[in-house]
Image: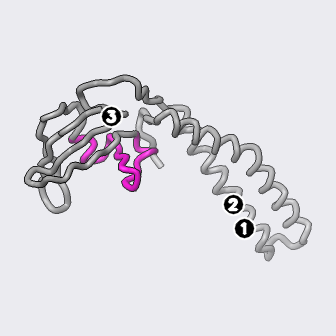
């Protein structure tokens, strides 16, 4: 997975990923080593399902460790105390689709934190990029699979 040059993270996400990395490097590695040792004790490794499963788990865990190390090494922690009238990474933004009355709120975050369920959108997503540097009252548009859509920024926090 290719990383963007700067990985933006909230302080909470940075702490969460750091905790996950510590857990994987200490506890999880030790558990997998024990599984491998047990599986080796069962004999013939070529037909040993427990051994193969433990090796796959080890590979996946080491891959996740490398991914987390890469993310954390390039991470820029978002200072949410900085308030701006313009949309930037870390902003909470309310928008309204032109022609509708429903307002939607989003938090602009780095790609590693994006979650539509939590209304956190990446600054690299089409909507996120279209909102960057806009101010309250600005109208912007962006392309969707169904065509161009216009929105108005109703609040920046």
Helix, strand or loop under label 1? helix
23 relative to 82 in the view: left or right: right
Residue at the far bottom in the pictured view? 47
Quadrant of the snapshot with the C terminus: top left
> Which-is-in-front pick, marks 2 and 3?
3
Identify the magenta region: 110-130
Helix, strand or loop under label 2? helix
Residue 15 drawn at (x, y percent): 58, 36
- How dense is the environment of label 1, judged by Cα within 10 Å: few (below 14), some, or many (20 and up)? some
Nearest the camera: 37 or 25?
25
Q: Is residue 127 magenta?
A: yes
Q: Which residue is mark 3?
A: 91
**Among numbered discs 2 and 3, the one appearing first in the sequence:** 2
- How dense is the environment of label 2, judged by Cα within 10 Å: few (below 14), some, or many (20 and up)? some
Residue 87 occupies quadrant? top left
Residue 57's tag is 2
């Amino acid at each position: 997975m290719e990383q963007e040059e700067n990985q933006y993270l909230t302080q909470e996400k940075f702490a969460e990923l750091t905790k996950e990395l510590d857990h994987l490097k200490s506890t999880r590695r030790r558990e997998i080593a024990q599984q491998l040792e047990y599986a080796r004790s069962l004999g013939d490794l070529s037909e040993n399902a427990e051994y193969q499963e433990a090796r796959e788990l080890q590979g996946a865990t080491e891959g996740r460790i490398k991914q987390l190390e890469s993310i954390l090494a390039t991470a820029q922690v978002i200072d949410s105390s900085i308030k701006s009238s313009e949309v930037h990474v870390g902003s909470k933004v309310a928008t309204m689709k032109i022609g509708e009355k429903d307002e939607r709120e989003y938090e602009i975050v780095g790609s590693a934190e994006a979650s539509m369920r939590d209304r956190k959108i990446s600054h690299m997503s089409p909507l996120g990029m279209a909102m960057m540097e806009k101010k309250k009252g600005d109208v912007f548009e962006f392309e969707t699979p169904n065509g161009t859509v216009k929105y108005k920024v109703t609040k920046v926090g």
